[in-house]
């Protein structure tokens, strides 16, 4: 039996006048990537220096202006990486480097050594403030834990005196979500006073969900409470650093923005310890999908995936929001049909805004293509097959033909699973375009008899083969198609009725071919089917469509 009784609920926040539910996200926050520190430390095989440089360059290209590059006092490779960035002049003037360090003097001294030559840096100090860690890890009371934060701030001030660049202080009360709000505020205010924070010398207070402990709305309440209770809010950049233990980090971050947060720390695709950090790309693409500029260059998600997977040696899941290989793929027949109709309506209406069922964004806007959108398997329907024929090959099948051809593809998919667009086209040729037995159209001469008083003013002189034997037939009709149909009835006794006819150009220009579709009803058997013909001459394409349909009636 599941031992749920051994767990207790995390207390909620008493904030009856909360404001965040009425707010909207209207702009991008300050983004800070922690891939090279928080993300890297969670890798089975951490990145080497050159991999970190490649990843750093990607982050710069994407438009991150704050990048946490590591923990330079913790290991030589972290130290060397930062020195490589400085010595190789890889840090753009508008990018701020962030480094993490514990509140210990020898570590802070080593950190400033590594930073020499960096024009502007965020020095990120932290210590755990939660009730649980005070009790079982540090065995300290509140005053002792607060003293660590104050002394850490004083040490940063001490060593920045000999530093030739600009320093911004960031302080994180680690395990903020497990800390009493009044105490978390008390520690932050002590750091602010020690630092001398002001409107012109802001301090970053980063409030991490080091472990995600409850629902996102409670985190939002915690953030709003802090936001409303800082005594000098204009001196504070309020940052959040959600983790994903409950699988709701993105929601927690978005609600935190509603609650007053200015800044988000996270990683690409949510890499991080345990279930990971908040996925910055997910949030940014969410904003983009709402018409908000995320202020990151995310037009080519394939490139981002390529560098991420190569450096982290972690694959992006096929269902990962926006980035997964299958997220713009529809297997369901009803979905495929809706996508087909939505794309068609967009084109016909010349719409400015993107509105297509089941596709919240245009895949091409993020560097994806339409080819993988619809994939055909045994669960697919008529709309999906028609969409493939139109999107890939330019054949706009009449609506009545959708089911007929989809049934053909259904049989293939039931045997082999997914059916590629190439296989669908190959079957289309076999079923419709290349049907030349038992009847094969050779040529037809049309004579206009419009100067007569006859009801039928078109004469068709048809040449065709019947089981390989050439035959000639002629008859009158009210047009070329009717004339050919009547000629076949006279010669072979085939009695049919045309139920549907349509045509369109395949491509553009004077050399474009035309496609014709004809649905014939066999008046003797009651069977009906479509035939398809293509030719540079639309009349000839129509004749071929008649023979295609007759051959299908004969063999089906």
Image: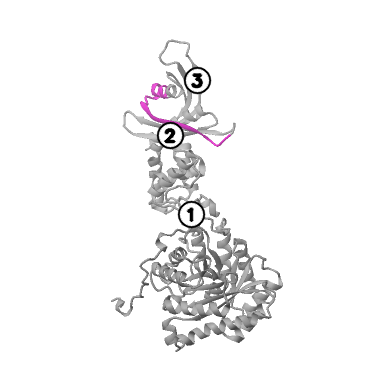
Q: Is residue 496 magenta?
A: yes
From the viewer's side, name the closer residue of 18 and 352: 18
| 533, above or below 306, in the image | above
Q: In which quarter of the image is the N terminus?
A: bottom left
Question: Can residue 434 be seen from the camera position used here?
Answer: no
Q: Name the residue under label 3.
A: 446
User: In the figure, is residue 59 to the left or right of 452?
Assistant: right
| 80, above or below 424, in the image | below
Residue 197 x %, y %: 57, 74
Q: Tell me the SS state at disc 1.
A: helix
First reached walking from the N terminus: tag 3 or tag 1: 1
| 187, above or below 221, in the image | below
Evaluate if marks 3 and 1 touch, with contact meaning CB atoms under 8 Å apart: no
Residue 235 x %, y %: 55, 71
Real-space Cα separation, disc 1 to disc 2, in angstroms: 43 Å
Looking at the rendering, the stretch of residues picked out in magenta corresponds to 485-508
From the viewer's side, name the closer residue of 74 and 252: 252
| 339, above or below 498, in the image | below
Q: Name the residue under label 1.
A: 289
Q: In which quarter of the image is the C terminus?
A: top left
From the viewer's side, name the closer residue of 235 and 548: 235
Residue 501 x %, y %: 42, 30
First reached walking from the N terminus: tag 1 or tag 2: 1
Rendered image coloring scheme: one colour
Task: Assess disc 2: are there few (<14), some (14-19) or many (≥20) residues with their C-alpha within 10 Å of its C-alpha.
Answer: many
Which residue in the rendered view is the most extreme toward the bottom? Answer: 139
Residue 438 x %, y %: 43, 33
User: In the figure, is residue 33 to the left or right of 5?
Assistant: right
Task: Assess disc 3: are there few (<14), some (14-19) or many (≥20) residues with their C-alpha within 10 Å of its C-alpha.
Answer: some
Q: Name the residue under label 2.
A: 531
């Amino acid at each position: 039996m599941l031992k749920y009784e051994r767990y207790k609920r995390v207390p909620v926040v008493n904030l009856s006048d909360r404001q965040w539910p009425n707010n909207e996200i209207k702009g991008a926050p300050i983004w800070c990537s922690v891939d090279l520190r928080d993300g890297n430390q969670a890798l089975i095989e951490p990145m080497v220096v050159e991999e970190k440089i490649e990843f750093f360059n990607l982050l710069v290209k994407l438009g991150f202006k704050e990048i946490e590059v590591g923990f330079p006092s913790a290991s030589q490779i972290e130290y060397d990486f930062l020195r490589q960035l400085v010595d190789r002049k890889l840090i753009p003037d508008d990018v701020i480097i962030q480094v993490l360090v514990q509140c210990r003097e020898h570590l802070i001294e080593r950190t400033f050594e590594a930073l020499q030559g960096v024009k502007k840096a965020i020095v990120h100090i932290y210590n755990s403030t939660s009730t649980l860690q005070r009790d079982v890890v540090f065995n300290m009371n509140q005053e002792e834990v607060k003293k660590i934060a104050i002394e850490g701030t004083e040490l940063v001030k001490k060593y920045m005196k000999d530093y030739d660049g600009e320093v911004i202080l960031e302080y994180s009360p680690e395990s903020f979500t497990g800390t009493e709000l009044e105490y978390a505020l008390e520690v932050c205010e002590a750091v602010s006073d020690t630092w001398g924070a002001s409107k012109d010398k802001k301090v970053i207070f980063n409030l991490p969900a080091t472990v995600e402990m409850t629902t996102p709305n409670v985190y939002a309440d915690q953030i709003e409470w802090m936001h409303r209770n800082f005594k000098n809010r204009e001196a504070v950049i309020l940052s959040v650093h959600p983790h994903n233990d409950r699988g709701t980090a993105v929601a927690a971050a978005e609600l935190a923005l509603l609650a007053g947060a200015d800044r988000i720390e996270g990683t690409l695709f949510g890499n991080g310890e345990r279930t990971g950090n908040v996925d910055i790309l997910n949030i940014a693409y969410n904003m983009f999908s709402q018409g908000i500029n995320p202020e990151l260059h995310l037009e080519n998600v394939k490139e981002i995936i390529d560098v991420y997977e190569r450096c982290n040696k972690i694959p992006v899941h096929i269902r990962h929001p926006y980035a997964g290989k299958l997220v713009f793929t529809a297997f369901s027949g009803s979905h495929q049909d809706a996508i087909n109709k939505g794309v068609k309506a967009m084109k016909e209406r010349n719409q400015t805004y993107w509105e297509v069922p089941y596709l919240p964004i245009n895949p091409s806007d993020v560097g994806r293509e339409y080819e993988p959108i619809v994939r055909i398997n045994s669960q697919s329907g008529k709309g999906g097959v028609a969409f493939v024929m139109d999107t890939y090959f330019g054949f706009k099948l009449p609506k009545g033909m959708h089911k007929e051809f989809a049934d053909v593809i259904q049989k293939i998919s039931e045997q082999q699973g997914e059916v590629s667009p190439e296989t669908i086209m190959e079957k289309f040729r076999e079923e419709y375009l290349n049907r030349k037995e038992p009847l094969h159209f050779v040529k037809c001469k049309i004579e206009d008899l419009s100067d007569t008083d006859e009801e039928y003013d078109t004469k068709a002189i048809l040449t065709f083969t019947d089981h390989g034997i050439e035959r000639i037939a002629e008859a009158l009709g009210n047009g070329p198609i009717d004339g050919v149909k009547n000629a076949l009835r006279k010669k072979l006794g085939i009695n049919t009725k045309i139920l549907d006819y349509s045509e369109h150009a395949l491509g553009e220009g004077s050399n474009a071919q035309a496609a014709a579709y004809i649905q014939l009803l066999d008046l003797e058997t009651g069977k009906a089917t479509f035939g398809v013909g293509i030719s540079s001459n639309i009349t000839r394409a129509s004749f071929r469509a008649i023979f295609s349909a007759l051959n299908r009636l004969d063999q089906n």
